[in-house]
Image (cartoon, helix red, strand yellow):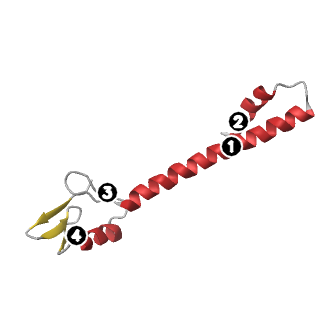
Amino acid sequence: MPEATSAGGGYSCQVCGTAYPSESALIQHGRDQHPDRPVTWGDTRKTNVRMETTEIKRDAKQGVEEAADKIKAGVKAAGEKVAHPEKDLKTEYEQKKMDESK
């Protein structure tokens, strides 16, 4: 994880060594030049917001995809129950859910 240091009143990027006069200039440099790496301040209290947002979006997308698979499986199982009343709805749902998750 790259670190930023404040030496002599300025800030330097520990990834590439570039020096900046202000914290905001260093943060902008990190966003532009190292977007895939979090910005830390020695004790990792601050992280790059862009990185956290990307992780949240990825987790949300995965959750939505899983919910959609469950809904599809439920609809298909209900259709099977209507077409074949002798079939067990829970068993059909579990089978369709396994099919959707592949």
Dot 4 falls on a residue whose secondary structure is helix
Measure the alpha-carbon separation of dots 1 and 2: 7 Å
Pointer 1 and pointer 2: residues touching (CB < 8 Å)?
A: yes
Image coords of residue 55 (percent x, y): 45, 53
Dividing the image into 4 quarters, which one contains the C terminus?
top right
User: Disc 4 marks which residue?
Assistant: 23
- The earlier-in-sequence mark between 3 and 2 is 3
Image coords of residue 48 (percent x, y): 34, 60
Against 83, is 54 above or below?
A: below
Which residue sits at x=92%, y=34%? 83
Measure the alpha-carbon separation of dots 4 and 2: 50 Å
User: Disc 2 marks which residue?
Assistant: 97
- Specify whether residue 102 is in view: no
Dot 1 falls on a residue whose secondary structure is helix
**Residue type for callout 3:** Thr
- The earlier-in-sequence mark between 3 and 4 is 4
User: Disc 1 marks which residue?
Assistant: 69
Measure the alpha-carbon separation of dots 3 and 4: 13 Å
**Residue type for callout 1:** Asp
- The earlier-in-sequence mark between 1 and 2 is 1
Q: Which mark is residue 47?
A: 3
